[in-house]
Amino acid sequence: MYKKIDSGILQELEHIVGKKNLITERENMEDYGHDEIALSHMRNYPEVVLRPSTSKEISEILKLANKHLIPVVARGGGTGLAGGCVPVFGGIVISLEKMNKFLELDEENLMATMEAGVTLMKFHQTLQEKNLFFPPHPGEESATIGGIISTNAGGARAVKYGTVRNFVRSIEVVLPQGDIVKLGGKLLKDSSGYNLLHLMIGSEGTLGIVTKGTFSIMPIPKASLTLIIPFDDVSGALKSVPHILCSGILPLSIEFVSSELIIMTKEFLKKSWPVQVGNVYLLIILEGEDMEEVEKASMKVSEVCLSHKAIDVFVAESRDKQDEILEIRSKIYEALKSKTVEAIDIVLPRNQIEPHLKRLSEIEKEADMWLPTFGHAADGNLHTHISKFNLKGEYIEDWEKKYEDVRRAIHDDAIERGGKISGEHGIGFAKKEYLEIFTDKSLLQLMKGIKRTFDPNNILNPGKIFDLTQEKY
Ligand SMILES: Cc1cc2nc3c(=O)[nH]c(=O)nc-3n(C[C@H](O)[C@H](O)[C@H](O)COP(=O)(O)OP(=O)(O)OC[C@H]3O[C@@H](n4cnc5c(N)ncnc54)[C@H](O)[C@@H]3O)c2cc1C
């Protein structure tokens, strides 16, 4: 169905972006053919990589791609974990890397506007200089604004502030047929018809290419503390969570992780970890207007956890120590990556985490496959890592034979418990068959109908979220 890019089309593309922003040499396209998912088959070369500088250039590329039926994939930082930016049909990859300007800091409306290729790191740093703050914190700061909008990224702070969706006020987007439109505005309310802004957020580059984003921002909370609370087992840790929330304290984040994974990650990063006891930790970040408020909250949290068999409570006060703890938590995936086949991203009602973990431990034993799991204890989003190693730590030569059954069993249990396939990484290429299996048929038809309305020729990120045709690469 799709056409190959011939020399005539290549010339037209060069005319749009300029020679130095068009890449066709294989060795220079290597980085544009994959994201951070560990599945080695989830990569493919595009025919050409384009690095446009304006929305108008993107519009012209999409008009040309529609005319010649060429698939187009938008790429941000390539940090995705679902194969979303992999050009599975070849064609064009549009990298947003040159659209990286911070456009406006509007302190009166507390909103920031920037081009889609700005990285999270740059966003955070620019705000920090002004004592301002963007709460969502997906763990990898080389992700871009366009990427976090398109995946509706989450991260550890979602328990207090929600996901990226809660902060996006407006976007500029180039629609698949080349129209440049603005959705939303510097508004905190909007009941003006169907909300296409929220349809675009989380659509994984299948409905449009985001070129600018405006986000709500906040003043930096003046005080914060990070608590590490060790437990002998995960049950006490998880049972503490609803009691913390019912006590009226809403931490910035509540994560649970095993000491085994923390030790592995601190050794990987050559960092130190201040707590030597316990098998499972709750990592809790508290923030507030002043130290007195935060310390009071810390006492309440400690009381709750100690009454649920916490062994101790370690409190990190200095900025450096808190940052070091957060860094170790954020890099667990990096430390595990060489052993991992795939990081699962299911999300469950909070009270189903514990029974799901019990089922995981049964699956782990039945398959003799190590399934390290950690996650966001307060919002139910768990990351189980399907590994290539057995419970004795030995490499499983034929892990591919077990992988699909183990993966399916984990998802079956999550769905039975009222969960969903993805809490924050998106469906991308990696999970699309599960979306078909676990989604009501009439809802799937509605989703496919929306895609056809936006993109009748199915040129924008085809083969992602679901297949419109039977074709596979
Ligand atoms: C170590 C590590 C930790 C992570 N931690 C978290 C976490 O805590 N929470 C979380 O939610 N995620 C996390 N992620 C996943 C990843 O960082 C997020 O999914 C992020 O939102 C991807 O942004 P990106 O710019 O890298 O997008 P890419 O990977 O480049 O693309 C992701 C998807 O968005 C689309 N896209 C990208 N830019 C645009 C655009 N401008 N317009 C339209 N579509 C676009 C792509 O086509 C693709 O479908 C983590 C990843 C790593 C490697």
Image (cartoon, rainbow, N blue to C red):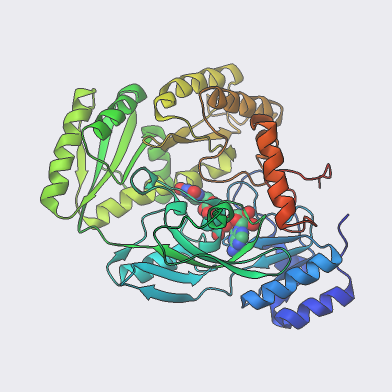
Q: Is residue 82 above or below residue 11?
A: above
Where is residue 281 shown, x and y percent of the image? Answer: 32, 34
Residue in the image at 78% along x and 45% along y: 468
Residue that lies at the very extreme toward the left in this rendered image: 292
Residue at 56% across, 61% down: 77
Name the quadrant where ligand 1 sits: bottom right
User: Up-down: is 399 above or below 340?
Assistant: above
Residue 337 rendering spot, x and y as whole percentages: 55, 44
Q: From the viewer's side, name the closer residue of 310 and 167.
A: 167
How many numbered marks have been drawn onto this rendered protein structure? 0
Q: Quadrant of residue 7?
A: bottom right
Query: Does residue 78 show up?
Result: no
Asked if residue 171 can be seen in this view, the reply is: yes
Determine whether, in the image, residue 147 is placed left or right of residue 51. Answer: left
> Residue at (88%, 61%) from the top-left corner?
3
Q: Quadrant of residue 217?
A: bottom left
How far from the left and from the top, in percent, is residue 248? 21, 37
